[in-house]
Amino acid sequence: MLVNKIWHCLLIGDYMTKRFTVIILSIVLCTSVLFVSCGYNSSDLYETQEFLMGTVVLQKIYHENAAEIAKEVNDRIAEIESTMTINKPGGEINLLNDAAGKEYVKLGEDTLYVLDKAKQYAEISNGAFDVTIGPLVKAWGVFTDNPRVPSKNEIDELLKLVNYKDINIDFENSTAMLAKEGQIVDLGGIAKGFAADEAVEIYKEHGVKSALISLGGNIFTLSGKPDGSPWMVGIRNPRGNDGSYIGIVRVKDKAVVSSGDYERFFEKDGVRYHHILDPKTGYPADTGLIGTTIISDFSIDADALSTAVFVLGLEEGMKLVESLDGVDAVFITADKKIYVTDGLKDTFIFKDESKEFEYVEKR
Amino acid sequence: MNRVKKTVLLGLFVSQALILSIVESWIPIPSPVPGVKLGLANIITVITIIFFGFREAVSVVIARCVLSSIFGGGGWMLFLFSVTGGVLSSVVMSILYKSGRDKFSITGISIAGAVSHNVGQIFVAAVFMKDLAVAVVLPVLLVSGCIMGFFVGLVSSFLEGVLRKTRIFD
Amino acid sequence: MLKKGDFFILGFVLILIIVSFTGVYLYKNSGSNAHKIAVIIKDNEEIKRIDIDNVNEPLEISVSGEYNNIILVEKGRIRFKEADCPDRVCVNTGWLTGKGDTAVCLPNKTMIKIEGQSSDVDIVTY
């Protein structure tokens, strides 16, 4: 009945009626189009979270195929995890560790790459970053439900197995071997970095122009935000709650990775034992730092270095970072002071709501 | 028109409006936003304005709202909510009607009525919740008000013609 | 059938629509990098604040007053799940997912609103 009325208005009604009806109908049309496009267009941002590598992997992608790309990234991360994990059965590192002191094992491209990088960082950090720390990590059990303080004897014994120089890589045959029986390679301090770099590769392959990925707090920003502005990445307050920060770095195309004594720790008899073990002492690194953050072009570098400089301490760590091209760092000391490398002096924004930290500008 | 006849007719209008609002609540309108309604009761409001006048229209609206909130439950809030929208729309429609039928058609008046009805309701909700956030639905509501008002207006103008012919209101 | 004045009405309404649409659009797009915080308000007082982007398991909240509401929170969205108020407009509103989205149970004086939290970081390391 009403449809007839509309028809009547359009066909037979006088000129004004026709115009009027047309206007009404176009309003209807426009609004329905608006609603439909709003669905697609509201921000173009696709955000997803997945539990991988023992942590939460958050992706923010600006792209029309974001959902597929995010899935591809998650699949790749899952693949990397299964290849390099020592917390689950299977994978290549488990094979490598089982064959320690016995024979060479065939390894894939990814694993060889990561092992080699790990060795490089062990060398430039003088052993402060050492993936052969596996046996000690196991003894402390910091990543498990039953952490414990091993005895000094136990630690001294296990220290004998810690030596990155015992990682023997045969690139020609794509094999590797650990020199001594009982040695264990733990890629926990570098695998996420590798995974983040791989994720970024996938983003680039698909022509993504703006994205951000966080692998358990290990962040990579692809380019800047869609409007061209840099991503604002907060540096975690080592003594604050989740999400609280003491400063912000404005980054584009950079990896931002933090290490600290707040990530995994347990307390016994009033002493806090955290998870970043010093490969020289066998105990949690105690060099006056509670948090380090590395900003660099590749996440694998940032991951390894953030651990390395934490173990090295402020002086040595600062020296190491300043000696490397394209790498910057933020150091947070136990007495709540913040130091940054020269490269960050202009881009680091000190913002501490807890008002407990002090930003030391001159060194 | 003598008083008895007037009272009876207005009473009929009130019950018509009541029925229309009940029936209207049975028709679900798929919409991302709450508050999108057909506004069928506005037909009665317009007709009352045409055949009687502003005061009568407002009385019919208030009576309808009172009964509606008694029968439908909902208490004071619902009443306040619908009465504000209803009264505001009566005011707007009366003003437009009085300024001349040569200037505004029934359809146009209905659109204005529907839109002001929605605005009135949003206003009450905002004041009630002391928060302007409810106004995010305004654009959608305004558009739906236009559309619904248009159709309600077509029906009303049609109805007016029919009612005039019956000569009840002379 | 249609008169001159009608166009003024239509024009006026159109302007209202454009203005309100722009207003809402601006509101929704300010600070879009932040987490969504849903706020539950009863009797004009904030009774609960939830970061709905951080919710991993569905969560139910009961609100009692003249009537009773059950609010369901899932990751990134929130809604009135059940209500015994007479019109159930609140439940019929469905899911609230974006900044500024609102659902109201007037009879029970309860409102859910998603605020944007203007934040100066996109993410924090850990």
Image: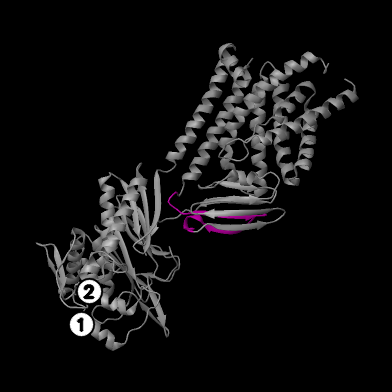
Residue C86 visible in image = yes
Residue A99 placement (x, y as % from top left): 19, 72
Which colour assignment does the render follow? one colour
Mark 2 chain: A
**Magenta extent:** C32-56
Residue C72 placement (x, y as % from top left): 57, 54
* Residue type (three-letter) at the residue carrying disc 1: Lys
Indicate the quadrant where residue B108 lies: top right
Neighbor class of circle 1 (other Cα within 10 Å; few <14, some 14-19, many 20+) is few
Q: Are marks 2 and 1 in contact (CB under 8 Å)?
A: no
| Residue C24 shown left or right of residue C85 in the figure | left
* Residue type (three-letter) at the residue carrying disc 2: Thr
| Residue C83 shown left or right of residue B50 in the figure | left
Residue C42 placement (x, y as % from top left): 65, 55
Under tag 2, what secondary structure? loop
Quadrant that contains the C terminus of chain C: bottom left
- Residue nearer the viewer, C50 or C86: C86
Neighbor class of circle 2 (other Cα within 10 Å; few <14, some 14-19, many 20+) is many
* Residue A160 tag number: 1
